[in-house]
């Protein structure tokens, strides 16, 4: 478990006052004259995330003011862990925050602090970058913060780890550690056993890599509880296969197991919270590599469920491995089936990095996920599973093609492809997500990122508790 920059108490903690734009003027006017003069001298403006430290009369660090803007930006404290001098701080007062919002602002103050403190520095000569710590605010929901922060950090670490050290076997090892931590059961089906056990699509896509392809299958919780199954795309590196990616497109492809990382983080949170579900996590863990035995454009691949896949493009590998995982998931008719995948560039063209594309034939489930996303400060955006575009992935020689030739609606045709392998009676949602912060934002440093995780936890907790 990562060490979060929070402490239970610290007698020397520097008090921080968080203040909204609206309340700032009258708050400042009620302060001692010296502080008023100081705040004016430095030109402090209480925009979200702005801060100003001030001294005691003796010249020590006396306290700080942090702007909350209009009070709706939950990430206001997201840069403080590294922007403030090292040491302990505490929340002294939330000024201008309505009574009903005090809990959520306190919770988010510490959550944004923790998520913003994250650095991936294990590979540096001197790892362990220092950050300022926060005393647990009294009103913060500690279990929630620990659940979501640890989940996101696990997801980020898995994504940020270079493919050299996060291949299919390392991803399975990380899953084993997670299983051991929570008393879950882990099965891994490796190499030719995929053929014996009828998971031919996973084998076909992953067979060219030096590390053998595998299916990771984690199970946790009472069998009598409702079955919640999470499927994650675990392409540990996506070179594009024989339809090789250009260097710009390949550069970030260590993150092509971002879906797997997202569901493993979510699983950590679900098990930590002991939600009354029977959880299953299925991850086809492969590398899309080039070798003499690589799958080829024009090949026709068998699947577990039956429909054959013509390979239009070996770079549309994710949907092929997910086909077998989703079919296996449906065999026990789960009460909820979710898949997360860094599936298409088209979803990024449509929605950019910050909004995971959500697809579901189930309107209630989609609405619940959108509502939870809004509420949890983890927005998702629904796109249509438009059956009219299914003809774009028709094949003349097989039952379906893995890549449309037209390039139209690439995220939708990928989602329709997956739907082919999901049973109609299973409530299912698919997230096509980016898994990466391309630029620094408060609480969200550049690098691997857990999108849709809080939205998903909230929906699962509300449905099954
Ligand atoms: N992993 C990629 C999708 C991707 C690329 C996600 C960049 C995020 C950023 C996926 O395997 C892929 O290569 N998809 C192709 C599909 C195409 C060949 C039909 C794509 O989107 O270009
Ligand atoms: Mn690809
Ligand atoms: Zn991929």
Image: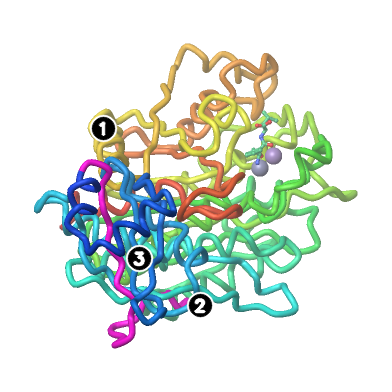
Q: Is residue 133 left or right of residue 301?
A: left
Residue in the picture at 52% in, 70% down: 175
**Ligand 1 is in which quadrant of the figure?**
top right
In what element is the residue under mark 3? Answer: strand
Q: Which mark is residue 177?
A: 2
Instruction: Identify which residue, 224 or 28, lies in the foreground.
Output: 28
Image quadrant in which you'd find residue 127: bottom right
Kindly identify which numbered label has been placed on residue 439: none
User: 399 or 444, which lies in front?
Assistant: 444
Upstream in sequence: badge 1 or badge 3: 3
Residue at numbered disc 3: 64
Write the residue at 47% across / 72% down: 186
| Side (left or right) of 450 relative to 463 | right
Query: Badge 3: few (under 14), some or many (20 or more) residues near its Cα, within 10 Å?
Result: many
If the image is split into quadrants, where does the N terminus sit? bottom left
Span highlighted in magenta in the image: 1-22
- First of labels 3, 2 by sequence position: 3
Mark toward the viewer: 3 or 2:
3
Which label sits in the foreground, 1 or 3? 3
Question: Which residue carries the number 1 mark?
Answer: 367
Whether residues under marks 1 and 3 lie with C-beta atoms below 8 angstroms apart, the answer is: no
């Amino acid at each position: 478990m990562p060490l979060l920059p929070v402490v239970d108490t610290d007698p020397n903690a520097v008090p921080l006052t968080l203040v909204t734009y609206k309340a700032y003027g009258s708050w400042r006017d009620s302060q001692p004259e010296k502080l008023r003069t100081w705040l004016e001298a430095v030109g402090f403006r209480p925009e979200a995330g702005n801060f100003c430290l001030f001294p005691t009369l003796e010249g020590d660090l006396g306290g700080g003011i942090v702007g909350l803007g209009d009070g709706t930006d939950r990430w206001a404290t997201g840069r403080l862990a590294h922007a403030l001098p090292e040491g302990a701080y505490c929340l002294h007062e939330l000024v201008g925050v309505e009574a009903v919002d005090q809990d959520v602002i306190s919770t988010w103050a510490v959550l944004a602090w923790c998520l913003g403190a994250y650095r991936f520095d294990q590979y540096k000569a001197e790892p362990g970058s220092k950050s300022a710590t926060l005393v647990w605010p009294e009103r913060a929901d500690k279990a929630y913060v620990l659940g979501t922060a640890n989940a996101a950090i696990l997801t980020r670490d898995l994504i940020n780890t270079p493919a050299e050290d996060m291949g299919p076997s390392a991803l399975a090892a990380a899953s084993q550690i997670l299983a051991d931590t929570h008393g879950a059961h882990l099965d891994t089906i490796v190499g030719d056993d995929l053929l014996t056990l009828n998971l031919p699509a996973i084998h076909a896509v992953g067979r060219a890599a030096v590390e053998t392809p595998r299916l990771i299958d984690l199970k946790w919780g009472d069998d009598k509880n409702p079955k919640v199954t999470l499927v994650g795309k675990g392409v540990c590196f996506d070179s594009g296969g024989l339809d090789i990616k250009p260097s710009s497109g390949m550069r970030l492809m260590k993150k092509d197991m971002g879906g797997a990382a997202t569901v493993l983080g979510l699983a950590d949170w679900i098990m930590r919270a002991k939600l009354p579900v029977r959880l299953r996590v299925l991850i086809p863990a492969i590398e899309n590599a080039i070798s003499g035995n690589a799958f080829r454009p024009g090949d026709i691949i068998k699947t577990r469920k039956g429909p054959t896949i013509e390979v239009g493009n070996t770079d549309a590998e994710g949907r092929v491995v997910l086909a077998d995982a989703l079919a296996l998931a449906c065999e026990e008719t789960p009460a909820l089936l979710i898949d997360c995948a860094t599936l298409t560039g088209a979803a990024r063209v449509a929605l950019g990095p910050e909004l995971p594309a959500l697809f579901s034939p189930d309107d209630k489930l989609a609405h619940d996920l959108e509502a939870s996303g809004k509420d949890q400060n983890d927005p998702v955006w629904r796109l249509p599973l438009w059956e009219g575009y299914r003809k774009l992935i028709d094949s003349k020689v097989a039952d379906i093609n893995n890549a449309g030739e037209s390039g139209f609606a690439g995220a939708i045709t990928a989602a329709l492809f997956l739907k082919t392998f999901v049973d109609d009676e299973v409530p299912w949602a698919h997230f096509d997500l980016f898994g990466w912060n391309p630029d620094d934002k408060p609480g969200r440093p550049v690098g691997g990122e857990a999108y849709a995780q809080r939205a998903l936890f909230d929906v699962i907790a509300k449905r099954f508790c």
